[in-house]
Image (cartoon, coloured by chain):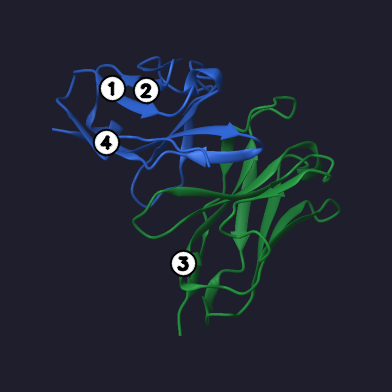
Amino acid sequence: SYELTQPPSVSVSPGQTASISCSGDNLGQKYVSWYQQRPGQSPFLVIYEDVKRPSGIPERFSGSNSGNTATLSISGTHPMDEADYYCQAWDSSTVVFGGGTKLTVL
Amino acid sequence: QVQLVESGGGLVKPGGSLRLSCAASGFSVSDYYMTWIRQAPGKGLEWVSHISRSGDRIFYADSVKGRFIISRDNAKNSLFLQMNSLRAGDTAFYYCARDRDPTSSAREYEFWGQGTLVTVSP
């Protein structure tokens, strides 16, 4: 079955750029979405179709996807960006999530 | 506006059954792929099942295949998940989610419910 791999944790200083990777076989051939989940809350979509932002998501959030790796970048990170982030793709009619990355802003 | 409200979670013994419901408002469930996603406490997200707009394409994760059944009632504008032969590993928050775009071939979840907790324990 298809798998997506994320680093368990990423740390960034406020105002700097955070990059979270997501790797999978030929991932660049699939659309990748990214979700943010704060403690005690439901996830919500921050990037879809690799690079697009839903309405209301700040331009600070951006995505890329090529080869075997997709990346979520958050520029000018705020303390409120501290959360778990999940990548997601779908393969052969089933959906796969990455294991999640805890972003710490310190 | 779009709203998804799950219900039906609770404590059940191993081998037991539960039926989860997801009441939708602000759109018609028959117009979108609808999906169940779960999250064990402190763990990551796991896709469980989805049903197509027409209802003729239904898929399950291997971990629940043969035990869970997804269904939809268009008149009640609701999504359901019948869970049978429950195991401790099924303990999780269960979320229903709606696709972002009804015409897209990609599964992208723009709307999520608040989740309902299922605990499988003796």
- What tint does the image give chain A? blue
Identify the amino acid type marked 1. Answer: Ser
Q: Position of residue B83 (x, y in %)?
A: 64, 68
Disc nearer the start of the sequence (4/1):
1
Residue at numbered disc 1: A19
Quarter of the image where the C terminus of chain A is located: top left
Label 1 and label 3: CA atoms lie apart by 32 Å
Residue at numbered disc 4: A82
Identify the amino acid type marked 4. Answer: Glu
Label 3 and label 4: CA atoms lie apart by 28 Å
Identify the amino acid type marked 3. Answer: Gly
SS type, badge 2: strand
Report whether mark 2 lies on the same chain as mark 1: yes
Residue at numbered disc 3: B89
Report if the CB atoms under discs 2 and 1 are less than 8 Å apart.
Answer: yes
Identify the amino acid type marked 2. Answer: Leu
Q: Is residue A7 above or below residue A68?
A: below
Q: Position of residue A49 (x, y in %)?
A: 55, 20
